[in-house]
Image: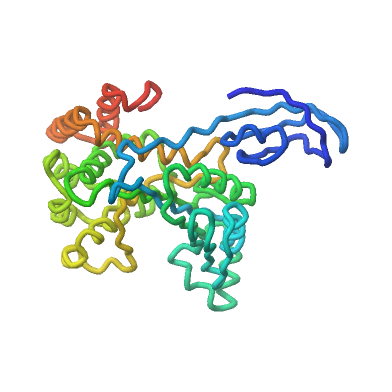
Amino acid sequence: MDWIPVVMRASAPWDVSRELSGGARHGPQAAVLSARVRCYVIGGQPGKEAAMAVHVEQAPDFAALPDPLGLGGAPRRVGVEIEFGGLDTRRAGELVQARFGGRLEVSGPQDVRVRGTKHGDFEIYLDARWRDAADTPLKKAGLELGRAVIPVEIVTPPLPVAALPDLERLRADLRAAGALGSRDGLLLGFGLHFNPEVPALEGTAPVHILTAFALIEDWLRKRNPIDISRRLLPFTDPYPRSLIDALADGWPDLDLDGLFDVYAAHRPSRNRGLDMLPLLAHLDRARFDRLFGDQGKLRARPTFHYRLPDCRIDEPGYSLAAEWNQWVLVERVAADAEAMADLTVGWDAHRNAFLSLRPDWARQSGEILRAHGHAGAQDP
């Protein structure tokens, strides 16, 4: 991070401190397209030159997936769900349209679509618990009063990984317009979900990725703790240790077919950091319905549903890339057979210890990851 002195001509009165987000299209910050730019005006009047110090925080790049090709040999795509407060659905849709083009379609205060953008069709709606709550004047008034805490969700079409930087620019637009993230208040349990396409619909690769996540989930939660509101609510519960036992015992031979019975036997729920139910429903709907029963409006799809990250959309220094890269780390660990072998052996030893606590495994798994080059010195 550097301080860069610049001089620019002020066209309007400047505040003593003015914060600008990355992705701007003009001004001295234009050259820093993927950075956060903080400008402190030292002096200047309209029409005069003002000396400024620009603090540049370079956002991380979006990492490539270790297995970039998916179904049919095409590049894997990822859908993204961004939850936030502070804006209504229409305003969020207008920002999507301004950034990506397309047609804004407003079906009501809880349901907006932006069709035909450069990336496809976007959906913007209230959290499912509130979608039907705008049908009376009293409920509408309640929605207005509770706008800061009622999640609005932007759901993207499936995107190539190369398009994810465009979402970072949209995040900056939303933040500038007043969007609020998870840590802006006690009740704001907003999440950021990634839905990366699986690399295959057969064999062991997707199960290896699930197993890697299960084995390092405690470490991931220690490395990047989620907001207390999401920890207290049952929306992102950690996997039960019995499921991790079964996955570790089944590595490296457990395949997607065998996963059905394993997953069904250990408290299946959508409220996990990694939700596998959409993928299992896609693989075999009849078997899924028999094992898992009615799952409401679950949409079957050939993707993982990574639900762990907070959405801290309004915080300086936050980026979607950092959260995406945590998922890529999971896939890299899954592809490292030696690291996986050590993790499974380590998990077995941990479970057979006289006292085995999850914080202990977070530390032990971090040591294994560090030994295999998957964690840095600053990581837990």
Q: Quadrant of the N terminus?
A: top right
- Please say if 209 is above or below 365: below
- Residue at the spot 37% in from the left edge and 23% down from the top edge: 376
Residue lying at 28% horizontally and 66% vertically, measured from the top left: 295
- Looking at the picture, the colour scheme in use is rainbow
Residue 209, visible in the rendered structure: yes
Q: Is residue 209 left or right of residue 105?
A: left
Spot occupied by residue 265 in the image (x, y as percentages of width and height)? 15, 55
Q: Left of 16 or right of it: where is 352?
A: left
Image quadrant of residue 324?
top left
Q: Nearer the viewer, residue 120 or 243?
A: 120
For the residue pair 150 and 298, the one nearer the viewer reads as: 298
* Coordinates of residue 349 in the picture (x, y in percent): 14, 30
Q: How many marks?
A: 0
Residue 66, quarter of the rendered image: top left
Q: Is residue 379 above or below residue 117?
A: above
**Percent position (x, y) of residue 194?**
39, 49
Task: Identify the image quadrant of residue 88.
Answer: bottom right
Residue 218 can be seen, yes or no: no
Position above or below: 340 against 213: above
On screen, residue 346 versus residue 217, left or right, reads left
Residue 270 in the figure: left or right of residue 107: left
